[in-house]
Image (spheres, coloured by chain):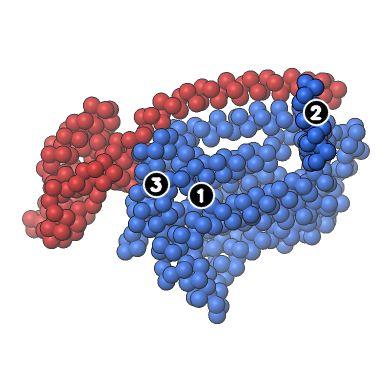
Chain colours: A red, B blue
Amino acid sequence: MTMIMTTLKYLVFCLLFLPAAAMAAGGAHITHVDLDLSNKAVERGRKVFEEQCSTCHSMVFLNYKATMDPELAAQSFGKEPPDLSMTAKAKGKRTDGAQYIHALLTSYYTHEDGRPDNKVFPNIAMPNPGLTEEASRDVAAFLWWASEPSREERKTLGKWVIGYMVILTGMLYVVNKRTWKDIKKKG
Amino acid sequence: MSEKLRGVQKWVDRRFPFTAFLEKHITQYPTPKNLNYWWNFGSALGIFFTIQLVTGFWLTMYYKPDANLAFASVEHIMRDVHFGWLLRYIHAICPSAIFLFMYIHIGRGMFYGSYKQPRELIWWMGVAVFLAFMAESFMGYLLPWGQMSFWGATAITNLFDAIPFIGPSLVIWLRGDFAIGDSTLNRFFSLHTTVIPIAVIGALIFMKLVALHHVGSNNPVGIDIDKKKDAVPFSPYFVTKDLWFIALLLTIFFLFVFFDPEFVLEPDNSEPANPFKTPLHIVPEWYFLPFYAILRAIPHKLGGVVAMNGAILIVAFLPYLDWSKVRSARFQPVRKWMTYLFFANFVLLGWLGLKPPVGGLLLLGQVCTAFYFLYFVLYPLFTWIDRTKAEPERI
């Protein structure tokens, strides 16, 4: 019986640590940079978007229409340029989507045979927009903001809610301690 | 209480047993005084389910169950509706809390033998509530009409195809179309917002509480209690205990809602459903992962479906699989550690559900699946042979 017990206990601990150990391995393929996601960067990015990106790309949830006719764009590039309202949220959790956009915009290269391509998005239909490093970062910030404009309001309100909940929980805890005082004493 | 209010109470009580109901179920309900915090998740589930009803009711005012409008209407809620983002995030993250609490609640019942007589019916209603919540969250997940909504629903409804003879027709009947489409969205919306939450989950929870208050709560020691000496009235003792603990759980819940909703939300679902583009990985919500791992461990479609459903239904047989004389696993060392092992195995299955089932991981998934069922098959044996420590006379 003792042997069964020891084996069982050993197995429980092994099983619990296995996923944790495996989680530690693994990695990402996009190089993360220190992105500025402030409102200033977002506004700069908005300008770049309006001047360059919005020629082909729409942002329906922000009422941006592409200046170029979508059908014409589809004919020229072989594919209709996607709407960018939700891209930053669809391409990764938290700020990963912004990192993805920055990485994509700065990963254009030319094959030995002269064919242009993209390391992050192989066989991309979009030609290199030729943005500067700064402009790529700002566009990433703008698209990140655009994918969820309520983010700032959420975090501001969140601080008040959590503060309130912590105080409420503490007070209710004290109330409960007092309720049980006599019962606990008697055992 | 003022004389006037007392008059109103008397007037009502003559016509409806209001005071008697309140005393029986809340203020005077005799509750074992030794309940530990594992007993707090039932009431927490009640509160979190109510949150879902309230936020869901509100969301239906802005949401449009139409394949052409659904995705944009969710974004309308997120961007234009006052505090729409809050309603939607609460409603989208709450299922994670509900499933986590349900797993803890079920695990507590297994460990302390809450399924044993006279609480078998409560246990079965609980299994039914769990199944109903699975259906509820599965259907709700289609409504945002994102890529994962569409492909998740496609993958799950495809499973019915494995049923011999009627399978293919059944899939079309469920979807209301040859593929997931507008008619599927409409029927899922209807079921998700009316029959399942109110007539199924709500009614089952109500019946479960009636039965529970009829036989009384189990307790960590597992012995029948002396209602006079071992119990305390629900109010104030368990009102304050439940309140503070629910406040704690809500604080943690709000941390995710306000600061990290992406912890549970899938990025792929921020892309509108596209029937012509399959996502690279179709992963179910985390709370389905252990069963998903069991499904994929069996290299035969029908076999996998049977194993997955069997894994849930087998839990209902616990009242008959348990041959021990005591309820609580505290007094049975082998059962206790086998149950810990079962819990750890369940967590591991969940992790395996995230991984592609190839090579060593497939084998590990099969071993874990085998242990999952072996636990139940051996249950009569180890509950019967296990040396039982002496239970105390009183709690």
- Dot 2 amino acid type: Gly
Q: Nearer the viewer, mark 1 or mark 3?
A: 3
Query: Which residue is the site of mark 1?
Result: B286
Q: Earlier in the sequence, mark 2 or mark 1?
A: 2
State if disc 3 and disc 1 touch (CB < 8 Å). no
Q: Earlier in the sequence, mark 2 or mark 3?
A: 2
- Dot 3 amino acid type: Val
Looking at the image, residue B229 sits to the left or right of residue B60; the answer is: right
State if disc 1 and disc 2 touch (CB < 8 Å). no
B306 w.r.t. A20: above or below: below
Looking at the image, residue B313 sits to the left or right of residue B14; the answer is: left
- What chain does mark 3 sit on? B
Q: Residue at x 78, y 36 (%)?
A: B12
The residues tagged by marks 2 and 1 sit, at their Cα atoms, a distance apart of 53 Å
Q: Earlier in the sequence, mark 1 or mark 3?
A: 3
Report the front residue among B54 and A38: B54
Query: Which residue is the site of mark 3?
Result: B74
- What chain does mark 2 sit on? B
Label 2 crowd (10 A; few <14 / some 14-19 / many >=20): few
Q: Nearer the viewer, mark 2 or mark 3?
A: 2
- What chain does mark 1 sit on? B
- Dot 1 amino acid type: Trp
Query: Which residue is the site of mark 2?
Result: B7
